[in-house]
Amino acid sequence: MMFKKTIPLALASVVALSASSSAVAFIPQTSSSIISNRPIALRSTIEGDTDAILPAFETKDEYTAYLQKAGKLPDGFAVGTAKGTFVSVEAPALGPLPIKATVIHLTEGPAESWAAVFTSNRFPGCPVKVGKARLAEGKPIQALVINNKVSNVCPGGDGVAAAESVCAAVAEKLNLAGGASSVIPSSTGVIGWRLPAKELAEDVVPRAIEALQSDSAYSAAEAIMTTDRYPKLRSKTLSNGVRIVGVAKGAGMIEPNMATMLGYLMTDAKIKRDSLQAMLTEACNKSFNSISIDGDESTSDTVVAIASGLKDLD
């Protein structure tokens, strides 16, 4: 079947391009000679996909508009984001600090087919510990929750319990039959701080869920950023109509095993879980595990691929 050959390449392409922290080139408006020869590859965006090689952009607003048009979600997915504040227990003198939460929801029910690859760092973050446990259990997943600002790595309190409490808040708000165990958490940001679980669970996450929409993944790409200069989103529609959309963040602590911070791939393909896991592993080996920027292997690295299963492969 052609799909079996196509989707690993598509996954690798989406993963690799989403990981790139230097894929955006802005052209000064005074450079008329360059502007007059701008590539016409934007036509791919009209069809809903990002180009294999991004065109140059004159402004950040143009780049943003490009990703928004290319960020159409696969069938069966909704994304919501929200902003909030918290006061760090470790650094209260800093006062209220901003934090964002992102929720990715499978609107048609839990997904049996999902896969994940995590950091091999010997001191993984608490969300990674939870995610690895979910992967080992092999239960269906129906939501992901991601926060920036605090990584929940080596926190002073019980970081696993904090991550689980945020998952429980997602499950309760969405009325998920699988409860907290059907939610995968991810965190990125400062190491050594306690996760503001109360603020996330009682304020930011509920508002992110209220903001759920099924149009574009762009808001997720933007909300998971920390030190990234620009959001990273890539998309691909296969000839049979199956769609793959990926968002990622990562600008530092990029070293093989794995070479990013966070990445999420969504597809509406109907595909077996073991096949998806093999494809994701292959894609990551060709991308994240082949990139190095500063030689630091992150404690939070997580890539999750999840399939709603609403479109046949034939």
Image (tube, grey):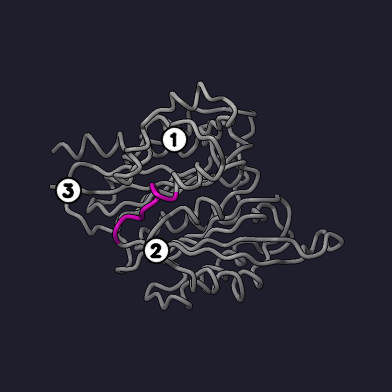
* Sequence-first tag of 1 and 3: 1
Badge 2 element: strand
Q: Main secondary structure of the magenta part?
A: loop
Question: Looking at the picture, how far across and down is residue 95, in whole percent?
Answer: 82, 64
Question: Which residue is tagged 2?
Answer: 78
Side (left or right) of 232 relative to 277? right
| Image location (x, y in percent) of residue 169 | 53, 74
Res 17 label = 1
Give me the C-alpha separation between circle 3 and circle 2. 22 Å
- Direction from residue 261 to residue 85 in the image, left or right: right
Q: Residues within 10 Å of mark 3 (few under 14, many from 20)?
A: some
Tell me whether circle 1 and circle 2 mark residues in contact (CB < 8 Å).
no
In the rendered image, which quarter is residue 41 located in? top left
Q: Residue flagged by tag 2: what amino acid is it? A: Ala
Taking 201 as reference, is 17 above or below it? above
Crowding at dot 1, Cα within 10 Å, few <14 / some 14-19 / many 20+, comes out as many
Give the image location of residue 231, x and y in percent. Answer: 54, 45
